[in-house]
Image (cartoon, rainbow, N blue to C red):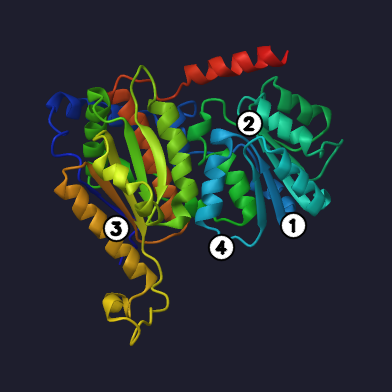
Amino acid sequence: MKKKTFLHKNYLINNYYKKKSIKNYFDKILNKIIKNIDFKRDIYHVLSNKFNLSFNINDLKKFRKFKNIAIVGMGGSILGTNAIHDFLKYKIKKKVTFFDNLDKDKINKFQKENNKKNYLFIIISKSGNTIETISNFFALNILKYNAKNIIIITERKKNFLSMISKKYNLPFIEHKHFIGGRYSVLSEVGLVPAYLMGVNIKKLRSNLRKYFKKKENFFLKESCIALSEIINEKKFRSLIFINYSPKLEKFLFWCQQLIAESLGKKNKGLLPIVSNAPKDHHSLLQLYLDGPKDKIFYIFHEKERKGNKLNLKKIFNKFDFLHDKNIEQVKIAQKNALKKTLINNKIPFREFNLGSTDEQTLGELFSYFILETSIVGKLSKINPFDQPAVEQVKVFTKKLLS
């Protein structure tokens, strides 16, 4: 019997799956992606079965001796790796530290409590000039000639990190220039750290083309068309990830960047917010259900081990309904109660249920949202691959520091 990875159901298509012209446009976009996916300079090549790594896997084996890893990057250079680590943490036996912001207290604590010689440092930046990444790199004070515990991942061009790698004779891995940062998790950017953490990267990439198949892509098609209609209509402004699975929190932060940077343009877009449940039932749910009707919801849940049952026998009759239940049953009941409430109030949502928490499932999730987000952008007349507003801030920052 074929293992189920993740299941999904749409509750937002009834009013947003109408126009035949958009359905035809979706087919043209997907067919073009399928036609060009094996072309080595296409961004979708990251999903190709013919994708080749820019390094020899045997050259990395010497780095697997490190039991401690520190990863330095920003945005798309590190969010995907953080998602991989959090999702598969039960398999990973190494200590991994992420430097994904400018936090001097975290750096000072790291330096006081750890021997840097025992750490492998992976420095990632597509441009090689990311100010925060370079700042953290030097704040950690690890740079030395011919260091055996530093790997640089950046584009093969004249940028700051590539020049540092050459000057100090540091191991260098190419970041393919045609793959944007937020779409790079299934390339060297995510696969190098994943491999060194002990993750099976072959399984992670084993089923990336699932949603190219006709029998599998109806959910992708109806979702892309509905979401493009929602974005163009501009009635909804926020996208709330209701997350009942702690393992998925970092993955959803990866989704947050992917969706916000890809689709937040031309006065369009949805503000993605990660909301952990059932905790947020007691803080934000009132607003979600009774505040402005400008939100759509994605509900995420995983099939967890049942765990110990709650023993409330002979304590209070009022809470007899909890007796002999486990935590998983309580969460499922809360999730289903929320679904019923959303349906009753005609609030659009989608549901994703994970049947397993392994490399293949995570790879499929990455692949699905990369495809969906980029196709929604094209259907909405948005370029899903640039980030012009962010570039303005980078220019101003450099000027203020000069």
Say what amino acid the circle numbered 4 marks.
Answer: Lys
Q: From where the camera sits, is residue 40 visible?
A: yes
Residue 65: assigned label: 1
- Measuring 83% from the left and 41% from the top, which residue is drawn there? 147
The percent position of residue 1, horizontal first and vertical second, equals 30, 67
Q: What element carries label 4?
A: loop
**Is residue 284 left or right of 182 when viewed as pictured?**
left
Label 1: which secondary element = helix
Disc 2 packing (10 Å; few <14; some 14–19; many ≥20): many
Residue denoted by label 2: 125
- Of the two numbered discs 4 and 1 on the same chain, state the one appearing first in sequence: 1
The nearer-to-camera label among 3 and 1 is 3
Residues under numbered marks 2 and 4 in contact, where contact means CB atoms less than 8 Å apart: no
Instruction: Tell us which disc is closer to us: 4 or 3.
Output: 3
Instruction: Where is residue 91? Give x, y as percent.
Output: 56, 63
Labelled pair 4, 1 in contact (Cβ < 8 Å): no
Disc 3 marks which residue? 335
Question: In terms of sequence position, does the residue under pointer 4 or pointer 3 come before the other?
Answer: 4
